[in-house]
Image: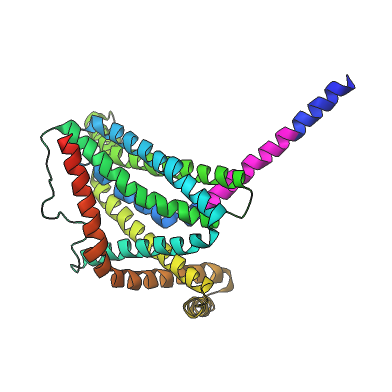
Amino acid sequence: MSGLIALFDDVAAIAKVAAASIDDVIGQAAKAGSKAAGAVIDDAAVSPKYVQGFAAHRELPIIWKITKGSLRNKLLYLLPAGLALSAFAPGAISPLLMLGGAYLCFEGAEKVAYVLGLSHGHAEFPGQKTTLEDPARLEEQKAAGAIKTDFILSAEIMTIALAAIPTSNFWMEAATLAAVAVMITVVVYGAVAVIVKMDDLGLAMANRGRLAISRAMGRGLVRAMPGFLKTLTVIGTAAMLWVGGSIIIHGMQELGLNEPGHLIHDLAAKVGHLVPAQFQGVTEWFTKAAMDGVFGLILGLALIPVGEKLVTPLWRKLFQRDAKANNGH
């Protein structure tokens, strides 16, 4: 009997350790995922466009295809690559992180420049086929394009998360990174599914609502969605510039270039001292985030010629080649 009790004690102890490990994984995943806020918000802001023009009953199946592709990107490709980097080339994480930060700055600045008429952004380009007679093939092409875009954003998210995970054993890092991948994918594409169906919900309320107030709410929801999507895009762009700029500045400090980081920190502290003590912390944070974003915008504007003359043409050639192969198939 005493042996059985001892066995139960051992099982209880193991269960406590396992529960604590799970709590650690979830906690670290949440913290690491929050560091990738800019890419996450941009992912949620960009994805709804891939279901525009399709029948309402095909929107959720397309989003599910993209969700599965996003999980495949993160878990089958990026997770092993990230763990290999952490194990065999940890010194490469910071440069890759800076490269991802530079890309975020470029993407954010390109959107700003497009609004100002200084760049054509991601507008249609010569030779791009914009219509397909077969709706099923068009759906597959849109989903494939979304998954390709997701791969870039997922690479940024996973790299940022990897850098934010505290040094630990292999399995803890693997579990935390996998949790980040699943949590962020569920949050992003769950939000996308809600966003793209809100107008349908509004139409249903407006047309079939039993009460006048529910019909009015439905009409208001339909009218509000275009403005909401534009607001989400603005927030996503600002977050990209903020996160990208802060990544670059932090990376520069690791390379010994401390002046930009120190200057921003000192200016934020001075601004913080202009407000009452209870608001100093919040004011300093927002001031620093704004200056990181301005730095990211300046860097991104400088990178636009490189992106438009080199990176974007290469990406479009790859996209066209894959599209031709799919059409031929």
Residue at far top of view? 1
Choose top left, top right, bottom left or bottom right for residue 188: top left
- Counting from the top left corner in percent of width and height, residue 153 is at 37, 52
**Which percent across, then down, holds residue 315?**
25, 54
> How would you classify the magenta stretch by its main secondary structure?
helix
Locate the C terminus by quadrant: top left
Region rendered in magenta = 14-32
Q: Is residue 51 visible?
A: no
Quarter holding the N terminus is top right
Say whether residue 27 is magenta: yes
Q: Is residue 103 above or below residue 288?
A: above
Is residue 223 on the magenta stretch?
A: no
Residue at 23% from the left image edge and 33% from the top image edge: 56
> Could you say where residue 3 lies in the image, as x and y percent from the top left?
87, 23
Please state if 129 lies on the left or on the right of 246 as rendered: left
Task: Specify the quadrant of the image occupied by residue 205.
Answer: top left
Q: Residue at coordinates 64% horizontally, 48% vertically from top-left?
A: 169
Counting the numbered discs, the total is: 0
Q: Nearer the viewer, residue 259 or 30?
A: 259
Q: At 31% from the left edge and 49% from the top edge, which residue is drawn?
A: 149
Q: Nearer the viewer, residue 214 or 47?
A: 47
Q: How is the image coloured?
A: rainbow
Instruction: Name the outermost residue toward the right.
Output: 2
